[in-house]
């Protein structure tokens, strides 16, 4: 049997934010990696930078396919070229607001793309899957920390795609117990690789807090809107569980090791968070400290649909995956600023 070091992993959406960081760690760990990405929300330059960071040996183990999971010809090309031991499935659309305005775009891309992927995995005999789920499946949790066996809810079409796909994964595994599926529920991924060469580069005005702060810091946006300062929290702003993207990447390696070594996985979910809650004001202060930049703020009403406080219970991942986040808010802001200051326009050299 091939040693774990030589296993081949298909990474869908591997040119994106979490995908690039995870692919780099996979290459560093000696895996062979194929990416399929349609570059809808990413650029090929990101993959080139991963190659550079992985060095000669690592980059030899990386194949990049531009392709769309909704296109079966694209999937056929990828699956007929390599025999995969497992798939990490990041590819999907993720903007909550856009999903409310364009629900069909989300259902089409996220659901059809995943159904096609599962069909090809079955046809080619690969039944090991790590799927990107989200803390969004907890809706507005009544209790915190969020524990994996909480009742699941969705607040918007994006969240519903994650909820439906979790259910589909559970049904697929129930019907065929040979499947081993891990659903990873990420909390709020932020930060960047320590080199500052890869990071998050959203198209248009950022939806999420940290990319927004980053763009204010480099002068692309004038000020940060703080959505809600009257929450029943220590400083009135909402609380989230921010997690360093390198910790997330390592969480995927831990999930793969579990999938390769334990035969009783079934289809199971793990939270990937730090277990610590940080308020919006605290995040702004931490970023100001890391960057030495003043972030002008504007106090605004609450954003509809936002929860007061969300953070993870980390016990299950610690116990069963042997994984625990290593980085705190200080490192998240340090690395995000390093990426931002070296790449004020992301992967582009100018506006
Ligand atoms: P991202 O947009 O940076 O990466 C997703 C990648 O998938 C992009 O490169 C995009 O071009 C690609 N893609 C989209 N649809 C595709 C398709 N049909 N075929 C091929 N490629 C396609 O997003 P990310 O932040 O890296 O998120 C990765 C995954 O994690 C997503 O499924 C997202 O829903 C989930 N997630 C993200 C967050 C977050 O805040 N970043 C939180 C929880 C869950
Ligand atoms: C964090 C906090 C905002 C922007 C979202 C998705 C979730 C998951 C992670 C994918 C909130 C406040 C934000 C701004 C602000 N993604 N904020 N000004 O909403 O916790 O989660 O990303 O699965 O599904 O919903 O993250 O970064 O948007 O917001 O004050 O300009 O920052 O109100 O309290 P959120 P976020």
Image (spheres, grey):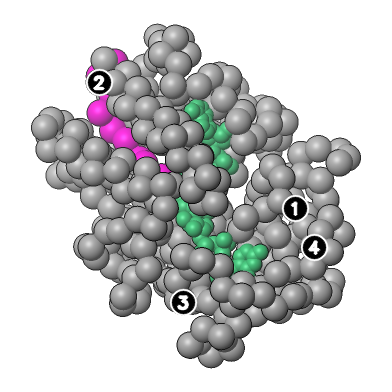
Question: What secondary structure is marked by label 1?
Answer: helix
Labels 4 & 1 near each other (Cβ < 8 A): no
Q: Position of residue 192 (x, y in %)?
A: 65, 53
Q: Nearer the viewer, mark 4 or mark 1?
A: 4
Give the residue pinned by disc 3: 308
Q: Nearer the viewer, mark 3 or mark 2?
A: 3
Residue at point 23% right, 49% down?
268
Residue at point 88% right, 40% down?
350
Q: Nearer the viewer, residue 5 or 232?
A: 232
Question: What secondary structure is marked by label 2?
Answer: helix
Question: What secondary structure is marked by label 3?
Answer: loop
Give the residue pinned by disc 2: 122
The residue range painted magenta reads: 124-132
Question: What secondary structure is marked by label 4?
Answer: helix
Query: How dense is the environment of label 1, judged by Cα within 10 Å: few (below 14), some, or many (20 and up)?
Result: many
* Residue 246 in the image: above or below residue 333: above
Mark 3 or 2, nearer chain start:
2
Query: How dense is the environment of label 3, judged by Cα within 10 Å: few (below 14), some, or many (20 and up)?
Result: some
Disc 3 versus disc 4: distance between alpha carbons?
Answer: 24 Å
Q: Quadrant of residue 45?
A: top right
Give the residue pinned by disc 4: 216
Determine if residue 65 is in view: yes
Q: Quadrant of residue 18?
A: top right
The reply, left or right, for residue 115 in relation to residue 93 is left
Q: Residue furthest bottom?
A: 234
Mark 1 or 2, nearer chain start:
2
């Amino acid at each position: 049997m091939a040693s774990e070091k030589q296993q081949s992993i298909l990474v869908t959406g591997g040119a994106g934010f979490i995908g690039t960081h995870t692919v780099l760690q996979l290459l560093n760990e000696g895996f062979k990696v194929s990416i399929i990405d349609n570059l809808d929300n990413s650029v090929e330059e990101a993959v080139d930078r991963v190659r550079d960071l992985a060095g000669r040996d690592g980059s030899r183990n990386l194949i990049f396919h531009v392709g769309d999971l909704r296109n079966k010809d694209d999937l056929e090309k990828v699956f007929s070229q390599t025999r995969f031991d497992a798939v990490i499935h990041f590819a999907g659309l993720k903007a909550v607001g856009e999903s409310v305005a364009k629900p069909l775009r989300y259902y089409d891309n996220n659901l059809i793309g995943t159904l096609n992927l599962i069909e090809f995995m079955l046809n080619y005999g690969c039944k090991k899957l790590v799927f990107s789920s989200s803390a969004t499946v907890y809706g507005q949790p009544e209790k915190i920390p969020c524990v994996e066996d909480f009742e699941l809810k969705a607040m918007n079409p994006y969240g519903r795609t994650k909820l439906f796909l979790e259910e589909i994964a559970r049904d697929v595994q129930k019907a065929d117990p040979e499947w081993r599926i891990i659903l990873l529920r990420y909390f709020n991924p932020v930060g960047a690789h320590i080199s500052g060469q890869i990071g998050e580069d959203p198209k248009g005005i950022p939806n999420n807090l940290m990319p927004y702060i980053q763009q204010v810091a480099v002068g692309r946006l004038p000020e940060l809107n703080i959505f809600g300062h009257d929450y029943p929290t220590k400083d009135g702003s909402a609380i989230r569980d921010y997690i360093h993207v390198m910790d997330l990447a390592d969480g995927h390696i831990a999930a793969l090791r579990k999938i390769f070594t334990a035969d009783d996985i079934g289809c199971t979910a793990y939270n990937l968070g730090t277990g610590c809650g940080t308020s919006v004001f605290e995040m702004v202060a931490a970023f100001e400290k890391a960057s030495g930049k003043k972030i002008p703020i504007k106090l605004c009403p609450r954003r509809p649909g936002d929860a007061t406080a969300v953070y993870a219970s980390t016990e299950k991942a610690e116990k069963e995956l042997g994984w625990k986040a290593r980085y705190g808010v200080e490192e998240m802001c340090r690395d995000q600023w390093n990426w931002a200051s070296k790449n004020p326009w992301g992967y582009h050299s100018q506006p």
